[in-house]
Each structure stands twice: as structure tokens, then as C-alpha cells.
Image: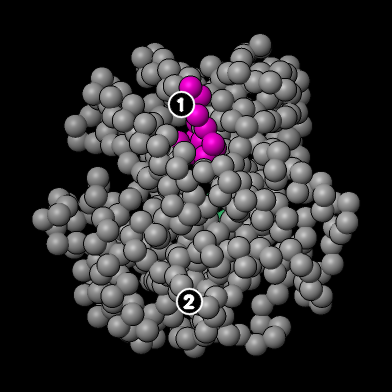
């Protein structure tokens, strides 16, 4: 495989893909809603090839999973080496070296120069459930606060704090009944119709002056769970002040801060964790997606004194298997050795500047926001900011037919989250396709 750019050899989905899709739709869960009719066959770097030989430039990296690029050679070599020695002993009952080595590496890159502990699991949702349980155990308090438009996953605990849309919740009540919700600073569509910075952060005021004064007592609240940049909700970046007010309040009342960095983590925003942009040192931090570059893995890292639960309080048979731990170690090695954070910063700035130029020419682009190589483009129909949802979906479909994988977020946003090793030329190819799609629209 020596991919040099997107290449469409047969209009996708091609004949082989159509057969697979038909069978898939008949047999797999109908809860899986696919963005595009891609049947992945092989991949490398920033490219994915489908089963009919079409090659796509990947601006989604599986929602940020293949962060250092598909099948990065260092990750693949580490996995192959581990496969030849030990695939599994369960970490409920025994110990392995890779878990300990990875913990040492993780504690160096996670925010906060204090003693920590880690709990490994297999998905972002599990890492959230771990955090929720841990915060409740440690504090012996009942409640947790989440944010409107937040996405934390699909297991019952994580889902109970997911408020991106009703389909994620409808039909599953009663959910874990401890959550209270408050507005996130979505300044482009402020719920209070105010403008930042003259708004005095009325959204945080709602939390401190309404939620914590009329609904739940701060001293009965175990945690505040937040995404430092909302992901599925539409790549929403809060003003720095938001986190200052939040963390001061939490500290004053002994409330634990849980940063969900499942999507923002691992270099995506130009720092290892997005919390670091805001000077935050969360008590608990969750990570998954890019953690092992495609192998199912997650971690919940906490202050040592917070992860103080009893033996048996929380476990999982498959957690932290040695092959996956080696993949995760290799990811950290690549990020360090290949200067990936610098690439994210430089190419992220470039991508953003090019998108801002497009915005001048295409009024459908209402807002561009994000950090590093995590950029949201909110599409609107008019000056009243009517969400251009259908147009957004048409752009995704048109891009797909031209060999570019784009993903959606929020009601009418595109999310650009390409592999963090993407180069200028590859970004330009994607931008050209995006502009063609905008023109056609
Ligand atoms: C911020 C955030 N938290 C949690 C999750 C859930 O992760 P998973 O799908 O691996 O369970 C996601 C997934 O998109 C996410 O973006």
C-alpha cells in the first residue's frame, strides 16, 4: 500500500460493499446508524481503502481513535512482539509488567504533579462509569452534575450523563438517578441570549446560584463531570474563565472534578490533555479513543487519595490485557518521538486559517471553533443561525463520493478530527474536496 491521495475507482458503495451492507443491515443491531456506506478493508496512515478498492482520505480517524494514523508501524510492531510472548492473564487475579510500565508513563503525561492511581478498562463509557463510581465511593455523597449537550457514552452510568439528544435517553428511564444538569458555555448559541464576555458567565451562575442553591446541596454533591471541549455536542470550546469559576467552586465545596478526555485526550488539542489549556488539574481524568490507536482500551486516572475504594469494589476481567497495554505504550512513544503535539498545533492552526478563508466565501459556515486538530464547523441556513442540518449531511455524502471521510457533530456541525500525523499536503487535498462540496451545495 502506497497511498498518495484519495482515489475513487467505482462509485461508493461499490458492488462488493453493497453485498456486505445488505447483510449487515439484516443482522446487526439497528441502533448502529452509519455516517456513510464505507466497508473498510485496509488502511494506512491517513487513508482508508474500502472493499471495492476506493481510497478515502480520513478526516475523522474513527472519531479520533487512530490518532497517530492507521496501523502506525511502531504500534503494530509492539503488538506483534507482545503477541509472541503473552496475550492474556487476567488482572483481577494476577500482575503484568505492561500495566505497570504504562502507569508510570501515564502519570508523567496527565495533568497534576501529585501521586496518582490508574484503573484500566475497555471503552470510554467504562472509563466514565469507573469515574462516577469512584467519586461516589470516595466522597460518600449522592449527586453528580453534568452539562447540557454533553456526551459521555452508552453504558447506564455514562448514558445517565449524556444529554446530546433524546434518542440517547428515550425508552431507558429511569436512568441512574443522581444527575443534575446545567448549561455549558455554548457561546455561539447562548441559552441566555448573552454575548461573551459581557455576559458575566451567566451559564456558570445558573449552576452556582440556581442548581446549587435550589436543587442540590454542594455538600451532597460528589462530582462535576465535564468535557473540556464538548465533542459529540458540536466541538464547543468554553471560555477559560468558565473552568476557573468551576474549579474554584468545586474546591471550596470538596466536589471532585471529573474531566472526560475520551475525545480531547491524547494530544488531539495540541497538548496531551485539553484540561492543560485551561490550567486544570482534574481529580479524575478519563481517556480512551486514541489511547491504543484502535485497540479497545481506556483508563481512568485519579489522585491517589481519591482512588481509595476497597478490594472488589470495581473490577473487569478483560481490563488491561498485555497486548493492548503495549499498544498504548507505543502510542505514547510515537507522540513523544515524532513530535506529534507540535504537528497538531501547527497543522491545526493552518487548517483553521484555511477554514476561516472559506467562511468568507461561503455564508453557510456560521462558526468555526475547536483546538488543535479538533475543529468544528457549524453550518447555518441564514443570519438567524437556523441549523443547516440537511445541508451538513449533503456535504458529508458529497465528500464521501469524492473520497473524503467527514463526520457530523451537534445539530448541524461537521467535525474535523483527522489523524494527528496528517501533513500539509493531505490537509490541502481534503480542503479542496470540502470546497468542491460547498460549491455544489
Ligand atoms: C467525550 C466522550 N466520552 C465518552 C465517550 C464514550 O466512549 P465509548 O464510545 O468508547 O464508550 C465518547 C464517545 O464518543 C466521548 O466522545
> Vertically, is 385 above or below 183?
above
Pick whichever, 65 or 2, lies toward us.
2
Please tell me which residue is depicted at 48% across the width and 54% down the height of the picture: 272
Q: Residues within 10 Å of mark 2 (few under 14, many from 20)?
A: few
> Vertically, is 417 above or below 362?
below
Q: Is residue 382 left or right of residue 164?
A: left
Circle nearer the N terminus (1, 2): 2
CA gap between label 1 and label 2 equals 38 Å
Image coordinates of residue 267 in percent, x first then y, are: 49, 49
Q: Is residue 159 left or right of residue 377?
A: right
Q: In this view, which residue lies farthest toward the right?
A: 84
Please tell me which residue is depicted at 77% across the width and 61% down the height of the picture: 321
Element carrying mark 1: helix
Image coordinates of residue 408 in percent, x first then y, are: 46, 37
Q: Which residue is mark 2?
A: 114
For the residues labelled 1 and 2, say whether their Cβ atoms are less than 8 Å apart: no
Segment tinted magenta in the rendering: 406-426
Image coordinates of residue 283 in percent, x first then y, are: 45, 74
Please tell me which residue is depicted at 71% across the width and 38% down the height of the picture: 73
Please tell me which residue is depicted at 63% across the width and 67% down the height of the picture: 103
Q: Is residue 15 visible?
A: yes
Tell me the quarter of the image containing the N terminus: top right
Q: Which residue is mark 1?
A: 424
Q: In this view, which residue lies farthest toward the left?
A: 198
Q: Residues within 10 Å of mark 1 (few under 14, many from 20)?
A: some
Amino acid at each position: 500500500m502506497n497511498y498518495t491521495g484519495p482515489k475513487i475507482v467505482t462509485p461508493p458503495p461499490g458492488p462488493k460493499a453493497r453485498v456486505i451492507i445488505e447483510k449487515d443491515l439484516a443482522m446487526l443491531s439497528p441502533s448502529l446508524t452509519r455516517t456513510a456506506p464505507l466497508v473498510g478493508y485496509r488502511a494506512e496512515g491517513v487513508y482508508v481503502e474500502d472493499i471495492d478498492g476506493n481510497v478515502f482520505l480520513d478526516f475523522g480517524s474513527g472519531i479520533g481513535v487512530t490518532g497517530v494514523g492507521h496501523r502506525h508501524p511502531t504500534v503494530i510492531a509492539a503488538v506483534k512482539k507482545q503477541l509472541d510472548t503473552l496475550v492474556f492473564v487476567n488482572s483481577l487475579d494476577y500482575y503484568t509488567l505492561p500495566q505497570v510500565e504504562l502507569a508510570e508513563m501515564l502519570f508523567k503525561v496527565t495533568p497534576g504533579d501529585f501521586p496518582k492511581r490508574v484503573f484500566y478498562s475497555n471503552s470510554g463509557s467504562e472509563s466514565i462509569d469507573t469515574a462516577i463510581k469512584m467519586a461516589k465511593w470516595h466522597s460518600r455523597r449522592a449527586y453528580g452534575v453534568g452539562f447540557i449537550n454533553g456526551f459521555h457514552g452508552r453504558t447506564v452510568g455514562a448514558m445517565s450523563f449524556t444529554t446530546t439528544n433524546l434518542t440517547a435517553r428515550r425508552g431507558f428511564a429511569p436512568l441512574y438517578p443522581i444527575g443534575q444538569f446545567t448549561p455549558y458555555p455554548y457561546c455561539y448559541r447562548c441559552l441566555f441570549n448573552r454575548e461573551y464576555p459581557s455576559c458575566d458567565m451567566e451559564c456558570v451562575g445558573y449552576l452556582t446560584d440556581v442548581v446549587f442553591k435550589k436543587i442540590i446541596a454542594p455538600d451532597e454533591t460528589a462530582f462535576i463531570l465535564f468535557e473540556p471541549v464538548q465533542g459529540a455536542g458540536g466541538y464547543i470550546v468554553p471560555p477559560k474563565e468558565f473552568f476557573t469559576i468551576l474549579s474554584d467552586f468545586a474546591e471550596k465545596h470538596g466536589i471532585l472534578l471529573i474531566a472526560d478526555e475520551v475525545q480531547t485526550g491524547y494530544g488531539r488539542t495540541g497538548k496531551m490533555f485539553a484540561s492543560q489549556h485551561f490550567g486544570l488539574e482534574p481529580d479524575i481524568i478519563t481517556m480512551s479513543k486514541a489511547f491504543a490507536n484502535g485497540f479497545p482500551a481506556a483508563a481512568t486516572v485519579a489522585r491517589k487519595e481519591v482512588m481509595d475504594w476497597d478490594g472488589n469494589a470495581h473490577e473487569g476481567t478483560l481490563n488491561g490485557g498485555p497486548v493492548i497495554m503495549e499498544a498504548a505504550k507505543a502510542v505514547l512513544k510515537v507522540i513523544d518521538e515524532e513530535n506529534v503535539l507540535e504537528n497538531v498545533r501547527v497543522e491545526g492552526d493552518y487548517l483553521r486559517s484555511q477554514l476561516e478563508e472559506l467562511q468568507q466565501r461561503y455564508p453557510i459556515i456560521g462558526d468555526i471553533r475547536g483546538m488543535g486538530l479538533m475543529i468544528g464547523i457549524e453550518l447555518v441556513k441564514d443570519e438567524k443561525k437556523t441549523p443547516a442540518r440537511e445541508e451538513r449531511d449533503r456535504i458529508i455524502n458529497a465528500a464521501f463520493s469524492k473520497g473524503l471521510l467527514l463526520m457530523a457533530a451537534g445539530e448541524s456541525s461537521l467535525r474535523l478530527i483527522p489523524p494527528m500525523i496528517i501533513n500539509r499536503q493531505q490537509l490541502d487535498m481534503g480542503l479542496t474536496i470540502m470546497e468542491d462540496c460547498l460549491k455544489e451545495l
